[in-house]
């Protein structure tokens, strides 16, 4: 949700425009309503360029600019509009007479701060809250404060969240600070180059040495390197080395790797994502313990005793992560017999939820930064519950706020529509269920049986992905549909919800996901000749029930694509049938998932849409 990027180097003669634009392309999935940059020229004047729309429009605009008058110091922003429409005027950087600022976050006390500035003679040219920041810094500076005091006083008066980069006229430096929104700085000591970014992927092509800023920290970089790194509350220096790490990410992990879109690449990465979830960074499945029919989850070790004492589980997430929660609930109750509920995070804290010290909340979030889920987590902590996290982003807010947790470790997910993260989340929930089950009544042999079947998953998913040509031709056949149902039951009901979400997001077809058992209680009223339903119907314990639902649809003239398993009988009621490999009932969600994902992807491509950047959406939703 909004990406910020900045670059500062002591090495002259670099194409700063190209570097900033490349950084923005890498961050674009965080928001693509508008983009802008600001740079210093050799006389330390600030030049800023902005454009409505995707980064490519700004890129095209800048083609016409001279590239050689600038020094390598600049800031950049790609926006997901919250305050004000996505116009050029509302695009970042925003400025006062002296300061240019890019901002990711939200200012909740905007009105109060605007009033203060208006009383003191400032006026505003945009609808954004961000414009307050450069003007407030100018205001504090005009009161005789030092630059650092003017900035820290400004930032400390903000109620809300921010990661900001600040460029000042006539000064060869960049200042970064954060509270509640992410900010990292790549450090290339050999070339005295510093790369600021909302996240690591755009940094790795410059350096893999990463300084992750914590809340309330401010960093100032100039020709002497890191000139200042302080905690804005205590104003004391911070030890840089404690926060520096070498990332395992490489340039390749942030590229499309020969695929047309990140979404397609990430769908095809799922077999590897499953392996990585079962044993990050190698092929040994070291998180699976065949001998004891259990899982080894280092992140839960210290919480082991506490986790034996919990008697209720609440799974919290939103969107795709919530759909994973719904499947997790079924795994937990079946395998552990601990009562479990799946809750959508946005309203959780508003409904005075029942939580006590024996309640375990598990927060699921790919980005680890989703504000709605952070709010829910804070409610759990306030009421004394114990919280675990499942996140893909190391050191994200949720991973820091939870008592313990486990990372997906599946590399960056760049496509806005979540694919491989969903698969990994579902798998980790199943692995958590085995862990809690083994702490209680799940027998060693049952545990071993589950563990052995998990090991078969990567090959089965690989086999499923081979169905792409058939799925693509079905997408071509049905690309003109305006509405669609996706139905499933039991473990596959949450998958129907997720399939519908995926189709909606990237194709704009009105897809609805239902438990097939619910269909006849209302939604079936919408079925008419030609209405398409995707039926998730492998040969499992509820196959006959699914067959009945399919019959009810075709009896009313509806069309069906059935996704079934290779051992199922002929499905007469379906126009088209896709057969996935046979597996055990609990694991069908993992084989159905690549099929609907590929279907959604190819539908989007057939319709001429960009599946990586669906309209109105952004990755990492850090506002409420
Ligand atoms: C859908 C999608 C979103 C996210 C949701 C939560 O494809 O990606 O629905 O699942 O915004 O995001 P995280 O998992 O980062 O908390």
Image (cartoon, helix red, strand yellow):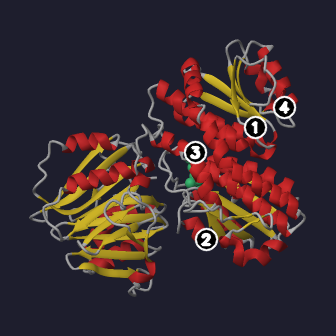
Q: Image check: 597 left or right of 291? A: left
Residue 560 location, x and y as percent?
Answer: 71, 21
Judging by the rendered image, the residue that carries numbered circle 1 is 582
Judging by the rendered image, the residue that carries numbered circle 2 is 401
* Mark 2 closeness class: few <14, some 14–19, many ≥20 residues within 10 Å: some
Q: Nearer the viewer, mark 2 or mark 3?
A: 3
The numbered mark at residue 543 is: 4
Image quadrant for the C terminus? bottom right
Picture layout, residue 146 above or below residue 602: below
Q: Earlier in the sequence, mark 4 or mark 3?
A: 3
**Tag 3's secondary structure?**
loop
* Mark 1 closeness class: few <14, some 14–19, many ≥20 residues within 10 Å: some
Between marks 2 and 3, how big is the CA–CA gap?
A: 25 Å
Between marks 4 and 3, how big is the CA–CA gap?
A: 26 Å
Q: Nearer the viewer, mark 2 or mark 1?
A: 1
The answer to whether the residue bearing label 3 lies less than 8 angstroms from the nearest atom of ligand 1 is yes
- Residue toward you, 519 or 170: 519
Residue 379 location, x and y as percent?
Answer: 69, 66
Residue 118 location, x and y as percent?
Answer: 33, 61
Between marks 1 and 4, how big is the CA–CA gap?
A: 13 Å
Residue found at x 44% / y 26%: 608
Residue 390 location, x and y as percent?
Answer: 64, 61
**Do residues under tags 4 and 3 come within 8 Å of each other at their CB atoms?**
no
Q: Image check: 584 left or right of 139? A: right
**Tag 2's secondary structure?**
helix
* Mark 4 closeness class: few <14, some 14–19, many ≥20 residues within 10 Å: some
Determine if residue 378 is in view. Answer: yes
- Residue toward you, 500 or 542: 542
Judging by the rendered image, the residue that carries numbered circle 3 is 419
Q: Nearer the viewer, mark 3 or mark 1?
A: 1
Residue found at x 74% / y 62%: 432
Picture layout, residue 500 above or below residue 32: above
């Amino acid at each position: 949700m909004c990406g910020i990027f900045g670059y500062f180097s002591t090495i002259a003669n670099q194409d700063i425009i190209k570097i900033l634009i490349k950084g923005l392309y890498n961050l674009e999935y965080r928001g693509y309503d508008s983009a802008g940059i600001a740079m210093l020229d050799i006389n330390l004047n600030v030049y800023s360029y902005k454009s409505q729309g995707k980064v490519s429009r700004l890129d095209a605009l800048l083609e016409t600019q001279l590239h050689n008058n600038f020094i390598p110091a600049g800031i950049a922003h790609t926006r997901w509009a919250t305050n004000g429409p996505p116009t050029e005027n509302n695009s970042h950087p925003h400025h006062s007479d002296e300061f240019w600022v890019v901002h990711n976050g939200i200012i909740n006390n905007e009105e109060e701060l605007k009033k203060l500035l208006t009383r003191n003679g400032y006026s505003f040219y945009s609808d954004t809250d961000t414009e307050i920041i450069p003007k407030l810094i100018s205001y504090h500076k005009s009161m005789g404060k030092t630059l650092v005091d003017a900035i820290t006083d400004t930032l400390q008066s903000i109620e809300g969240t921010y990661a900001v980069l600040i460029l000042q006229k006539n000064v060869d430096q960049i200042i970064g600070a954060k509270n509640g929104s992410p900010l990292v700085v790549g450090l290339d000591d050999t070339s005295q180059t510093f790369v600021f970014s909302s996240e690591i992927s755009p940094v790795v092509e410059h350096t893999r040495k990463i300084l992750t800023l914590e809340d309330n920290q401010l960093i100032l970089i100039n020709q002497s390197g890191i000139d200042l790194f302080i905690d804005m509350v205590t104003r004391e220096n911070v030890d840089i080395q404690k926060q520096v790490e070498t990332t395992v990410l490489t340039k390749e992990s942030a590229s499309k790797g020969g695929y047309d879109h990140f979404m397609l690449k990430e769908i095809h990465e799922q077999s590897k994502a499953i392996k990585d979830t079962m044993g990050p960074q190698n092929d040994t499945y070291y998180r699976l313990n065949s001998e004891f029919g259990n899982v080894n989850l280092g992140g839960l070790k210290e919480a082991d005793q506490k986790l034996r004492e919990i008697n209720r589980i609440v799974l919290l997430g939103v969107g795709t992560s919530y759909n994973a929660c719904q499947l997790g609930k079924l795994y937990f109750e079946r395998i552990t017999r601990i009562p479990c509920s799946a809750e959508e995070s946005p309203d959780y804290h508003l409904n005075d939820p029942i939580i006590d010290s024996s309640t375990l909340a598990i927060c699921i979030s790919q980005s680890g930064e989703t504000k709605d889920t952070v709010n829910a987590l804070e409610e759990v902590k306030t009421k004394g519950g114990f919280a675990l996290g499942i996140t893909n982003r190391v050191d994200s807010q949720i991973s820091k706020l939870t008592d313990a947790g486990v990372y997906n470790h599946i590399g960056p997910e760049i496509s806005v529509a979540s694919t491989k993260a969903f698969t990994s989340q579902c798998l980790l929930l199943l692995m958590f269920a085995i862990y809690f089950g083994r702490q209680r009544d799940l027998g060693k042999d049952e545990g071993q049986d589950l563990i052995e079947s998990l090991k078969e998953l990567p090959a089965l998913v690989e086999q499923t992905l081979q169905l792409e040509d058939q799925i693509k031709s079905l997408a071509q056949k049905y690309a003109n549909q305006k509405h669609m149902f996706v139905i499933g039951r039991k473990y596959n009901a949450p998958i129907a919800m997720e399939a519908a979400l995926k189709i909606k997001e990237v194709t704009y077809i009105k897809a609805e996901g239902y438990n097939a058992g619910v269909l006849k209680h209302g939604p079936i009223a919408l079925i008419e000749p030609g209405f398409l339903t995707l039926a998730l119907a492998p040969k499992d314990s509820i196959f006959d029930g699914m067959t009945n639902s399919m019959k009810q649809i075709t009896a009313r003239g509806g069309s069906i694509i059935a996704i079934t398993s290779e051992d199922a009988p002929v499905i007469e009621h379906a126009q088209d049938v896709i057969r996935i490999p046979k597996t055990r009932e609990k694991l069908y969600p993992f084989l159905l998932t690549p099929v609907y994902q590929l279907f959604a992807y190819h539908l989007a491509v057939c319709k001429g849409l960009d599946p990586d950047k669906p309209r109105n959406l952004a990755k990492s939703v850090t506002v409420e």
